[in-house]
Structure formats: C-alpha cells, structure tokens
Amino acid sequence: MPEGLAGWKFVFLCAQNNSTKSNDAALKGVQAFREDARYAKTTEIVSVDPTDPAESKFLGQMKIDPKTSVAMTVFLAPPGAVIATYSGATDKNTIVAALTRATSGSGGG
C-alpha cells in the first residue's frame, strides 16, 4: 500500500453483464492484482450491470456507456480518484504500472 493510504481500499468497478464481451478476460488482471500479497487486504472488486438504470448516474460519472458491448473496468484509489479505465481484458502488470504512475505524482491513466 502506498504511503498515506493506510486504511483505504482500492476498488475495481467491473461493468459487465451477459451481453458484454471479454468478461472473464476483464476480471483476469483484476483478480491477479487482488491475489498479490501487497494488495490482497486493500482491494475490493465491485461488479455492476452497465444497463442497470439505478447505476446510470454513477456510471456516467465513471464515463461508462450503458450500451457498452465490452466489459469495462475502472480502477479507483482513495479518495475516489480514477487511476485507470480499461476496456476488455486487464493485466496485473499494467494495473501495477498504472498504480505506480499515479502514486509517483506523474499522473494516472
């Protein structure tokens, strides 16, 4: 956990449903990140159906189209900052690199 974020959680917002493509591939990197001992206790995965009208406002804030045809993943860090957004497959190394960039002060994805 980067310094100063103790007690906070990383959140992966996974927007997918039975109609979206790459669902399993989208979860692969996210799950690998959560299984890493460095992040296991500080990572939550939240799934949401992009077509759920109750989630439309929030998904709009995350810039996720409710009509997306491919699984979307948003990587959030405390206090709700978007580190990166992924369309389709995710990869643990890419996620770790995005976190490193975000916490080094060189910006997020």
Image (tube, grey):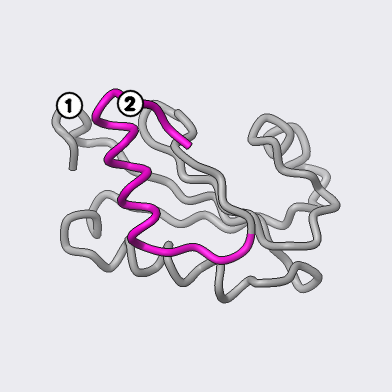
Q: Residue under circle 1?
A: 4
x 23%, y 64%: residue? 36
- Badge 2 marks a residue whose secondary structure is loop
Q: x and y percent of residue 65 in the render? A: 79, 44
Mark with earlier residue (2, 1): 1
Q: Is residue 63 magenta?
A: no
x 17%, y 56%: residue? 38
Q: Amino acid at mark 1?
A: Gly
Q: Residue under circle 2?
A: 106
Viewer-side label of 2, 1: 2
Left-right relation of 98 to 47 = left
**Of residues 37 and 97, the one drawn nearer to the viewer in this rendering:** 97
Which quarter of the figure is the N terminus placed in?
top left
Are there few (<14), some (14-19), or many (20+) residues within 10 Å of tag 2? few
Q: Eyeballing the image, is 17 above or below 2?
A: below
Q: Eyeballing the image, is 56 above or below 46?
A: above
Left-right relation of 42 to 70 = left
Q: Is residue 102 magenta?
A: yes
